[in-house]
Structure formats: C-alpha cells, structure tokens
Image (cartoon, rainbow, N blue to C red):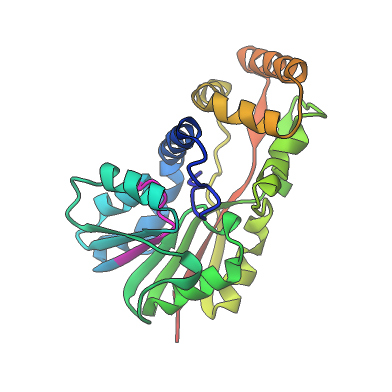
Amino acid sequence: MNQSKPSRFKKDSNNEFQEFVQKLHLQAIETAEERIPLYLKVGVKDANMILDAGCGSGIVTRDIANLTPGTVTGIDASKDMIDVAKHVLIDYKNVNLKVGSADKLPFKDNCFDITICNLLLMWAQQPQKVVNEMARVTKKNGMVLASLEPDYGGKLHYPENQKVDPIFAGQAIIDKGGDPHIGRKLRFLFVKAGLKTEIGIGNNRIWSCEEDKAYYQHARDFYIRALQNAGLNQKDIDDWEYHYLKSLDMGIQLNFFPQFYAIGKKIR
C-alpha cells in the first residue's frame, strides 16, 4: 500500500524512513496484480499524458511508465520521497518528477489524459479537494483513477486478538492522521467532483497463509513499531506474534480487508 502521500511522512530518522520505503516497494509488488488491470482499463497504453498524484517512492509510477509510450508525471508533497523516486526511475526517459501537493496541483486545467492516485486519499487532509484537483487537471473525456483505497471497517481476521486487532483494524491509521474508512467514500468523492463514476473492489483473492507469512516477515519491523506506538508492552507484542505465526504455520489464519477502486470519466 503506497502510503507515503502527504508530508506527514517526514524523514524523522533515516532507519524509519528506509523501512517505510522498503514497505512501499513490497506493497507495490504485492498489489501489482490488482492495480495493473485497472491501469489498462482506463487506457494508459494509449495515453499521451498521465499524472501520478502522490507518487511516493516512484515504484508505482514505474509500473505505469512500463505500460505506456506516453509521458508520466509524478508529483508528491515529500521532497525525500521524490529523491527516492528519482533513483528508482533514473533509467526512465518518459517520466517527470515534481514536488507539490495533490490538493493544489501545480498544473493548468485539462492537461492530462489520465490522472491516477494509489493509496493517496486515505492520507489526504481534504480528500474531496484532492479528487476535485485530479478532475480539474484531466482533459474532457479523460479518466481519473484511485487504484486502491482500503476500508478497514470491512476487515476480516481470524483467529482474533482483542488487544491487537483494533490497532490493525484502523486505529494505527487514525493515529497517523489517516482515514481507515476512505474506501466507502469513493463514490461520494468522485460524483461530487463531477465524474461519471464506477466503483469496485480490487482484491478478490484471499492470500494463503504462506503469502501472509512472507509479507509479515518482510514488513515485521513496521508492524512491531505500530504496536509499540499504540502502547502495547513487549510481553503482549511477543505473545501476539507467537500465536500469529503459529496460526500461519498451522494454516488456519485468515486475513482480508477490502481495497476499493474508483474510475471516473470527466464528462464536462
């Protein structure tokens, strides 16, 4: 989940920043099977000008650039993330990168054939303003895509843990200033922006326990820090991790939460 979007993810420490970038790259790999069909659906292969709003570390921008002969512009509020993206995209001649805010895009009206964001609206202070801006810079009959926006209210998890589950069911997102229920709001946001709107759920496949374990092992430091920041003591964290990994090894763990997408056509 490319969650680097707003400037609230500042480089507080080099280790935390690098861990976060690593998590973004892992998320991009894990969600490619959900995102890429959406990019194709909105027509990136035939587009001349594409905007990736809130491009973060550039790993998702790279996926888009690989699919189009057109020009892809990536913009993010964090200079640190743009610096990472420049390194990730150093060999891509069809990509431009810029520091700037998604709720005040520094582009004229009707510039882009397609405007895309990925896991941006969950972190936006004013998501309606962001969608309005994405629509503004998109050409008439162009497409606006929010490729993945989760809704933790629909999260399913078993076996349960009463201390940990509420944290991973949205509280950690709230604590960082995000909206864990943004997925259910996408239709409202897109229609209010004047877009002809289609809503769907991108992730229809439930991961196997082996896939869940591999993902957890890659992102373990991030999750442990989230539990520490939520106030859990080390004994509770160790107890949760032991039983969580044991349930994965036993093949009985189930994790799912819906990630919504929204496709909007600019009709005027």
Vertical order, 220 against 107 (above or below)? above
Classify residue 219 as left or right of residue 87: right
Examine the structure image and report whether residue 52 is included in the region drawn in magenta.
Answer: yes
Indicate the position of residue 202 as horizontal and vertical percent values: 52, 50
Q: Is residue 176 left or right of residue 20?
A: right
Number of numbered markers = 0
In this view, which residue lies farthest toward the bottom?
268
Q: What residue appears at the point 49 percent right and 24 percent down from the top-left corner? A: 218
Q: Is residue 33 visible?
A: yes
Relative to 225, is 75 above or below? below
196 w.r.t. 6: above or below: below
Residue 243 image position (x, y, % from top left): 71, 15
- For residue 111, which quarter of the picture? bottom left
Q: Is residue 170 magenta?
A: no
Can see residue 63? no
Residue at the spot 34% in from the left edge and 51% down from the top edge: 61
Name the spot of residue 47 as percent of width and height, x first: 27, 67
Residue range (magenta): 50-58
Question: Is the C terminus in the top left, top right, bottom left or bottom right quadrant?
Answer: bottom left
Q: Nearer the viewer, residue 24 or 191?
A: 24
Q: Residue at x 47, y 65 (%)?
A: 102
Q: Quadrant of residue 74?
A: bottom left
